[in-house]
Image: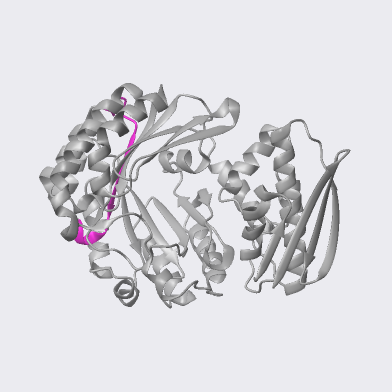
């Protein structure tokens, strides 16, 4: 698109998000907005052709005005482009990353969310998906100030995968930072004890935490033991099978870890090689068997759209993940961001098969007795689809629900850790981000500790 203008600056990114949904893009686009006597007026010019829209909405305050202004403008533009290009998106004009949050806000206002989702042209299948997720969250979803989840960042991996955009580094290049990083992590965790509210879950993630040697891993677990005193859910993102050992899993068990994540992404050896993994599918089966002997609940991740996989190859991975007996299986759709090797090799992968992969995974997982219990979306996501976590009955991960629905404070320590303070009564979230790179984080840890104390005070 060569030209875009709007007289409403805060809508610029929102409208561009709608444009990015489509493979075809207008050459020129202009937008203007006016609100008068309860009516929202949106005017568009798309490649020289003009469009006008009027929508009425009840405005109680400035926040509601902005919300409806965004909603009507995005819906109008989506309608124009969908008709022009003959394309329909599975989530219609919804570009936000958490459709379930919008559904909850409608329910809290005393309205069923379905009419709004239909207005935003969300597919019937996805409306049903949202309803299933909300049902599965009953008894876990809790919107209460003071609830806290505790996160520990271990930003080290054996290698960097081709699709990955996280701020992580191969451990063979960063091992020199580990002694100082461990010191800082212990100091941050000790200082965090006084900031924890009603602790709902602990999550050690990364990165690949099990890439640490046994003594380093125990230092992390020993520090966290001072935080986790109420026997809440305790998850470690064990990650890839090439870092699994019986000794490490036994150590996790000794420190009260209740759940681990094994992240296959694919059960195809060819795909694993293409994305930069240094293990095979055989190693994955060994990791699952090893973990199950310790009685952990197990989360597993798959990615639809990797490399040049077709639908049958991906469906094979879904079936194999089910065979492992994993308690949670999350189906991600490939999303390429700056920092990912695949993003550098091609600006965007548009895989028309991904939607078929998503559809088949839903059928396979439901047939196997799994239910969808959390979901979220990302920009630049293949097929404009979504990521969905599926769980066996009674095995939902509390941390995943809290973090995706943003209902609890997230107290996070380590490099590139983002703490969140959720103010439910004000419908507001505040964030405190630690430095991303290891050297800067280590040099700044005392300032981070003091800043976090003020942030959560």
Residue 274 placement, left or right of 366: left
Camera-side residue of 416 and 266: 416
Camera-side residue of 394 and 372: 372
Task: In the rendered view, tell whether residue 409 sits above or below residue 339.
Answer: above
Task: In the rendered view, tell whether residue 124 sits above or below residue 296.
Answer: below
Camera-side residue of 193 and 399: 193
Camera-side residue of 8 and 238: 8
Q: Is residue 240 magenta?
A: yes
Q: Residue at x 84, y 65 (%)?
A: 50
Residue ranking furthest to the left: 215
Q: Position of residue 179 (x, y in %)?
A: 13, 44
* Quadrant in which residue 202 is drawn: top left
Q: Position of residue 7 (x, y in %)?
A: 74, 52
| Quadrant (top left/top right/bottom left/bottom right) for the C terminus | top left
Task: In the rendered view, tell whether residue 85 sits above or below residue 113.
Answer: below
Q: Is residue 255 visible?
A: no
Q: Position of residue 235 (x, y in %)?
A: 32, 42
The span picked out in magenta is: 227-243
Residue 164 placement, left or right of 114: left
Task: In the rendered view, tell whether residue 201 sits above or below residue 310.
Answer: above
Q: Residue at x 18, y 34 (%)?
A: 222
């Amino acid at each position: 698109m060569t030209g875009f203008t709007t007289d409403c600056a805060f809508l610029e990114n929102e409208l561009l998000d709608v444009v990015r949904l489509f493979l075809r893009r207008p050459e020129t686009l202009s937008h203007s907005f006016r609100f008068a006597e309860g009516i929202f007026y949106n005017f568009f010019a798309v490649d020289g052709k003009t469009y006008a829209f009027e929508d009425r909405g009840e405005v109680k305050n400035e926040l509601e005005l902005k919300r409806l202004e965004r909603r009507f403008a995005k819906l109008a533009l989506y309608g124009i482009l969908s008709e022009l290009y003959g394309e329909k998106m599975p989530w219609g004009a919804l570009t936000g990353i958490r459709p379930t949050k919008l559904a909850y806000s409608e329910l809290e206002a005393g309205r069923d969310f379905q009419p709004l989702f239909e207005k935003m042209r969300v597919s019937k299948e996805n409306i049903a998906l949202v309803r299933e997720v909300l049902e599965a969250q009953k008894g876990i979803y809790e919107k209460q100030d003071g609830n806290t989840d505790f996160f520990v960042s271990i930003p080290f991996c054996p290698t960097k995968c081709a699709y990955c955009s996280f701020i992580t580094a191969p451990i063979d290049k960063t091992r020199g930072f580990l002694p100082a990083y461990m010191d800082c992590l212990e100091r941050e965790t000790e200082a965090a004890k006084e900031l924890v509210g009603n602790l709902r879950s602990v999550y050690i993630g990364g990165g690949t935490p099990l890439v640490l040697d046994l003594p380093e891993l125990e230092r992390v677990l020993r520090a966290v033991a001072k935080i986790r005193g109420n026997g809440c859910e305790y998850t470690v993102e064990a990650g890839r099978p090439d870092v699994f050992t019986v000794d490490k899993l036994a150590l996790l068990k000794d420190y009260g870890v209740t759940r681990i994540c094994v992240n296959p992404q694919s059960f195809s050896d060819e795909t694993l090689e293409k994305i930069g993994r240094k293990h095979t599918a055989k190693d994955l089966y060994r990791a699952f068997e090893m973990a199950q002997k310790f009685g952990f609940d197990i989360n597993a991740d798959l990615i639809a759209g990797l490399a040049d996989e077709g639908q049958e190859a991906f469906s094979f991975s879904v079936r194999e993940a089910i065979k492992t007996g994993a308690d949670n299986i999350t189906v991600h759709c490939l999303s390429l961001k700056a920092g990912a090797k695949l993003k550098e090799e091609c600006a965007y992968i548009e895989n028309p098969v991904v939607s078929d992969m998503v559809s088949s995974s839903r059928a396979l997982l439901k047939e196997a007795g799994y239910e969808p219990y959390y979901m979220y979306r990302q920009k630049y996501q293949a097929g404009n689809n979504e990521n969905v976590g599926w769980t066996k009955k009674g095995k939902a991960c509390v941390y995943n629900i809290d973090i995706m629905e943003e209902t609890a404070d997230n107290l996070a320590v380590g490099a590139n850790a983002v703490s969140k303070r959720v103010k439910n009564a004000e419908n507001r979230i505040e964030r405190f981000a630690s430095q991303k790179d290891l050297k800067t984080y280590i040099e700044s840890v005392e300032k981070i500790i003091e800043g976090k104390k003020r942030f959560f005070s």
